[in-house]
Image (cartoon, rainbow, N blue to C red):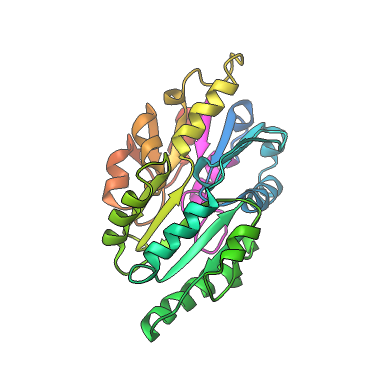
């Protein structure tokens, strides 16, 4: 048996929330159900549940599989029975302080991720920034990935943060991304938070977990399962983003998979692949 780990957005899903037909050969293969499966995403459990519901309807072989879910980039991990087995919330006082520190010149819009919702908080200061915020709202909230909506507020309100059901990460859309990244590294220097810079979306992400650490934790939980990967490096990983780079580099067999990938992501993987037909034949037949 093999252990596979997939990112979802961009790797399995197209921008419109539909499962990419190029991954069908992998997901519909009759032998996939004989293996172990991990989904690792930057999104929350609500989106994972929506994806799993849709995928199991479309690919019946997934219904019988034990599936681990590492959400919000590994900040929250769910066992195959749906139980939350790892939970690393952001310090809300530090979060409030950091938003105040980056507010004046660095951010256009901030998305805060919780286990069930995502909130857009924003302070539009000019027409250009308002257009960016409107774009984010149009693309992230009105339809949402897989129809999961994002709640939007037009102000950075401490009460929103204090009353949220635990915050595990934030994404900051910024026209001065590189400067913002340096500032975030300084703000969170005394923490073990993960900070990513994504120049494709002009975004910086901060979170309490990483996908790689999630794989390490899951492997440890399955140490007595002779059919599971014995170490995280043995997991076969598929991803398309900067939050996947650590997994793509560390796993012995990894695939960069998606559309218009950044060259650094492709180079971090063992192989770039678009259509998974050949991969499915080699790994599952």
**Residue 271 picture location, percent across and down:** 33, 37
In this view, 167 is above or below 248 = below
Residue at the bottom extreme of this rendering: 127
In this view, 196 is above or below 238 = below
In magenta stretch: residue 253:
no
Residue segment shown in magenta: 1-27
Residue at 46% x, 42% y: name it: 276
**Residue 62 picture location, percent across and down:** 67, 38
**Residue 244 picture location, percent across and down:** 41, 43
Residue at 31% x, 56% y: name it: 183
Q: Is residue 166 left or right of residue 111?
A: right
Residue at 59% x, 28% y: name it: 36
- Of residue 126 and residue 69, the one placed in the foreground of this image is 126
Res 18 seen here: yes
Check the picture and name the quadrant holding the N terminus: top right
Q: Is residue 219 left or right of residue 201?
A: right
Residue 210 position by quadrant: top left
């Amino acid at each position: 048996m093999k252990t596979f780990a997939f990112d979802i957005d961009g790797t399995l899903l197209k921008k419109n929330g539909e499962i990419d037909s190029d991954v069908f050969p992998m997901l519909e293969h009759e032998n996939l159900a004989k293996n172990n499966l991990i989904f690792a995403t930057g999104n929350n459990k609500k989106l994972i549940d929506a994806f799993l519901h849709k995928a199991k309807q479309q690919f019946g072989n997934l219904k019988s599989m034990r599936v681990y879910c590492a959400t919000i980039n590994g900040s929250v991990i769910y066992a195959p029975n749906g139980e939350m087995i790892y939970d690393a919330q952001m310090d809300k006082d530090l979060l409030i302080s950091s938003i105040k520190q980056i507010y004046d010149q660095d951010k256009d819009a901030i998305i805060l991720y919780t286990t069930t919702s995502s909130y857009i908080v924003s302070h539009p200061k000019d027409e250009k920034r308002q257009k960016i915020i409107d774009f984010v709202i149009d693309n992230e909230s009105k339809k949402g990935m897989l129809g999961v909506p994002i709640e939007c507020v037009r102000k950075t309100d401490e009460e929103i943060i204090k009353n949220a059901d635990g915050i595990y990460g934030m994404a900051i859309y910024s026209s001065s991304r590189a400067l913002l990244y340096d500032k975030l590294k300084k703000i969170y220097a005394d923490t073990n938070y993960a900070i990513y810079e994504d120049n494709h979306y002009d975004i910086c992400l901060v979170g309490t977990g990483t996908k790689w650490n999630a794989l390490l934790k899951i492997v440890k939980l399955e140490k007595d399962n002779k059919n599971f990967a014995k170490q995280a490096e043995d997991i076969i990983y598929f991803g398309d983003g900067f939050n996947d780079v650590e997994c793509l580099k560390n796993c012995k067999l990894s695939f960069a998979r998606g559309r218009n990938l950044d060259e650094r992501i492709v180079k971090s993987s063992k192989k770039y692949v678009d259509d998974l037909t050949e991969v499915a034949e080699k790994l599952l037949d």
